[in-house]
Image: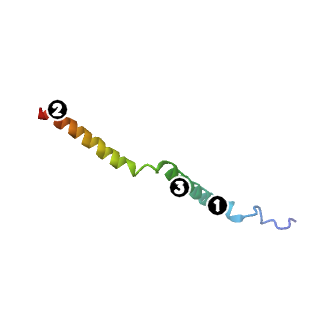
Protein backbone atom coordinates (compact mmCIF):
# COMPACT_ATOMS: atom_id res chain seq x y z
CA UNK A 1 0.00 0.00 0.00
CA UNK A 2 0.90 3.61 -0.33
CA UNK A 3 2.11 5.52 2.72
CA UNK A 4 0.43 8.93 2.87
CA UNK A 5 -1.65 8.14 -0.20
CA UNK A 6 -4.16 10.91 0.52
CA UNK A 7 -1.52 13.61 0.20
CA UNK A 8 -1.09 14.58 -3.44
CA UNK A 9 0.02 18.16 -3.04
CA UNK A 10 2.28 19.74 -0.44
CA UNK A 11 -0.15 22.63 0.08
CA UNK A 12 -3.66 21.25 -0.15
CA UNK A 13 -5.45 24.59 -0.60
CA UNK A 14 -3.83 25.20 -4.01
CA UNK A 15 -4.84 21.83 -5.47
CA UNK A 16 -8.51 22.36 -6.26
CA UNK A 17 -11.01 24.91 -7.40
CA UNK A 18 -10.63 26.91 -4.20
CA UNK A 19 -6.92 27.33 -4.80
CA UNK A 20 -7.51 28.37 -8.39
CA UNK A 21 -10.10 30.90 -7.26
CA UNK A 22 -7.72 32.34 -4.66
CA UNK A 23 -4.87 32.56 -7.17
CA UNK A 24 -7.01 34.23 -9.84
CA UNK A 25 -8.49 36.71 -7.36
CA UNK A 26 -5.04 37.62 -6.09
CA UNK A 27 -3.73 37.96 -9.64
CA UNK A 28 -6.58 40.31 -10.57
CA UNK A 29 -6.12 42.37 -7.39
CA UNK A 30 -2.37 42.78 -7.91
CA UNK A 31 -2.98 43.65 -11.56
CA UNK A 32 -5.51 46.33 -10.59
CA UNK A 33 -3.10 47.86 -8.08
CA UNK A 34 -0.29 47.84 -10.62
CA UNK A 35 -2.49 49.42 -13.30
CA UNK A 36 -3.60 52.16 -10.92
CA UNK A 37 -0.01 52.87 -9.91
CA UNK A 38 1.17 53.09 -13.52
CA UNK A 39 -1.75 54.91 -15.12
CA UNK A 40 -3.32 56.92 -12.31
CA UNK A 41 -0.57 59.46 -11.65
CA UNK A 42 -1.78 62.35 -13.80
CA UNK A 43 -5.35 62.73 -12.55
CA UNK A 44 -4.69 66.00 -10.70
CA UNK A 45 -3.24 67.84 -13.73
CA UNK A 46 -6.15 67.33 -16.10
CA UNK A 47 -8.74 69.69 -14.57
CA UNK A 48 -6.27 72.62 -14.38
CA UNK A 49 -5.25 72.04 -18.00
CA UNK A 50 -8.88 71.88 -19.12
CA UNK A 51 -9.74 75.05 -17.20
CA UNK A 52 -6.79 76.92 -18.72
CA UNK A 53 -7.73 75.77 -22.22
CA UNK A 54 -11.36 76.80 -21.68
CA UNK A 55 -10.34 80.27 -20.49
CA UNK A 56 -8.03 80.74 -23.48
CA UNK A 57 -10.78 79.69 -25.88
CA UNK A 58 -13.32 82.02 -24.27
CA UNK A 59 -10.84 84.92 -24.35
CA UNK A 60 -10.24 84.37 -28.07
CA UNK A 61 -13.97 84.15 -28.77
CA UNK A 62 -14.57 87.35 -26.81
CA UNK A 63 -11.92 89.18 -28.86
CA UNK A 64 -13.35 87.87 -32.12
CA UNK A 65 -16.97 88.81 -31.36
CA UNK A 66 -16.21 92.06 -29.49
CA UNK A 67 -14.68 93.89 -32.43
Q: Residue at x 25, y 43 (%)?
A: 55
Tell me the element at label 2.
helix
Q: Which residue is mark 1?
A: 19
Say which of 18 and 35 sits in front.
Answer: 35
Q: First in sequence, mark 2 or 3: give its number.
A: 3
Q: Residue at x 64, y 60 (%)?
A: 19
Tell me the element at label 3.
helix
Report which quarter residue 2 is drawn in: bottom right
Say which of 57 and 9 sits in front.
Answer: 57
Q: Is residue 39 left or right of residue 26?
A: left
- In what quadrant of the picture does the C terminus appear? top left
Q: Is residue 63 above or below residue 45?
A: above
Say which of 57 and 11 sits in front.
Answer: 57
In this view, which residue lies farthest toward the right?
Answer: 1
Residue 43 at x, y percent in the picture: 41, 50
- The disc label shown at residue 33, or none: 3
Tell me the element at label 1.
helix
Classify mark 2: residues with Cα within 10 Å, few (<14), some (14-19) or many (20+).
few
Q: Which residue is mark 2?
A: 64
Q: Is residue 35 left or right of residue 18?
A: left
Q: Is the C-beta separation of discs 2 and 1 under 8 Å?
A: no
Q: Is residue 50 left or right of residue 28?
A: left
Q: Is residue 43 left or right of residue 26?
A: left
Residue 25 at x, y percent in the picture: 56, 58
- In what quadrant of the picture does the N terminus appear? bottom right
Q: First in sequence, mark 1 or 3: give its number.
A: 1
Compute the Cα span from label 2 to label 1.
67 Å
Amino acid sequence: MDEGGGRRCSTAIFCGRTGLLVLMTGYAFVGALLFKALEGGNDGDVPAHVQRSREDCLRELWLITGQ
